[in-house]
Amino acid sequence: LKLNKVCREQGFPFVAVETAGVHGRTFSDFGPSFDVHDADGETPVVVPLDRIEIADEQDKTLLVRAVEGERHDVSKGDEIQFQMSNGDTMDNLCTVTQVQTPERIIVRLKEDSEVDLATIVDQVNSMASSFARQKQLVQVSFVSLEEATKAAMEDPSLFTPCDFDKAFDETRKMAVFNSFQSLNAFVKTHQKLPAGDGVSEFLELINQASVPVEKTQKWTQHCQLFASKCAAKFVPIQAIFGAIAAQECLKAASGLYNPIRQFLLYDCDEVVETADIYKTVDLKLVDSGLSYIMGSKITDKLRSRKLFVVGAGAIGCEILKNLAAMGAGTTKKGVIVVTDMDTIERSNLSRQLLFRDADISNFKSKAAEEAISR
């Protein structure tokens, strides 16, 4: 909360990420007014124009027809501009009011246009050869972490849905969000994560919270699962949320793409057996977060696997990093074989995280093997 407050005072974007077992949460705050210069990152389609007609003279709307077989990419509310064959654009900026078909749209002239419709129709039909959607600057407003936390229980707009099978389950959302809040309070008090006998105390803390949903058996199960696994770190979840945090930082720096507004919750609780969430596990008796969450049987099976990874580029490096972090192929029976006949170039270093300057000109497969063996 203090760091977020300082960032808002100094005008710096703020991104917070935390993971707990099979659950993760991000929070973004880019300030009271943030400009998104390009919401989708796509190059607008230049659509060949057939002709335009007056749709409703009183309403100042026009029917725009694309050449037969050509599809536009505009939606209601977008702005379009007509282009001449030499690439110059005409001054008439229009707002899309209706999408009739993939080839026909209804547009309205901007309110400041003083030229009559008939004149515009003649000008466009005689001079324009195409039209295209115009990128629009969008201003986005964020509230502070303190405000968002207080309003989260009542304001669903503060959550960005990501898993449509779970995101609209209010009981799950409130249980997970409240569990994260209670986890912070527990750690602040006890200076440790809830494990062993501490799980029951943590559950009591969760259930003391006031939430706008009924605390049913489903609520209890979500809270129990969170409490039983939150003391461990799960590599796949950490990889996902590390990538999400990096994307949010790029959005803040570039103004490209819509940022998360403002919390994002995600979990993969389906990997945990229901019976396991009621077992008490001592952290001292397990050697990894994976063992704590999924049990020693699955962990041992992963360590004994013989795996073949084809390619050590951007995706291959990410896969190898995750496999190494989970201990895959590390027993005498297990092995990871990686193949890639390509060599490392300087341009690879920004997106292939296993490689360093000293690896330039070396084979990717050999450098990747050395990196994950460190």
Image: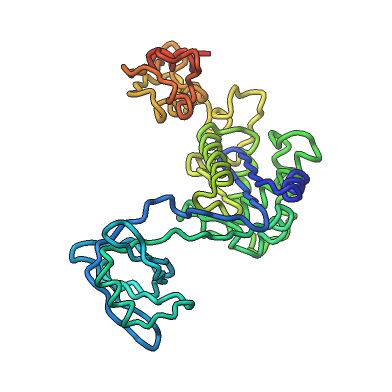
Q: Residue at x 37, y 74 (%)?
A: 107
Along the line of sight, which residue is nearer the eye, 219 or 55?
55
Q: Is residue 146 visible?
A: yes
Q: Is residue 335 left or right of residue 87?
A: right
What percent of the width, then of the height, locates residue 111? 47, 78
**326 vs 146: above or below:** above
Q: Residue at x 46, y 22 (%)?
A: 328
Residue farthest to the bottom?
58
Q: Is residue 218 visible?
A: no
What percent of the width, then of the height, locates residue 322? 48, 27
Dividing the picture into quadrants, the one containing residue 232 is top right
What percent of the width, then of the height, locates residue 292? 58, 30
Along the line of sight, which residue is nearer the eye, 168 or 257?
257
Residue farthest to the right?
189
Residue farthest to the left?
68
Q: Residue at x 61, y 50 (%)?
A: 176
**354 vs 62: above or below:** above
Dividing the picture into quadrants, the one containing residue 184 is top right
**201 vs 131: above or below:** above
Q: Is residue 311 left or right of residue 176?
A: left
What percent of the width, then of the height, locates residue 318? 45, 29
Along the line of sight, which residue is nearer the eye, 45 or 147?
45
Along the line of sight, which residue is nearer the eye, 248 or 212?
248
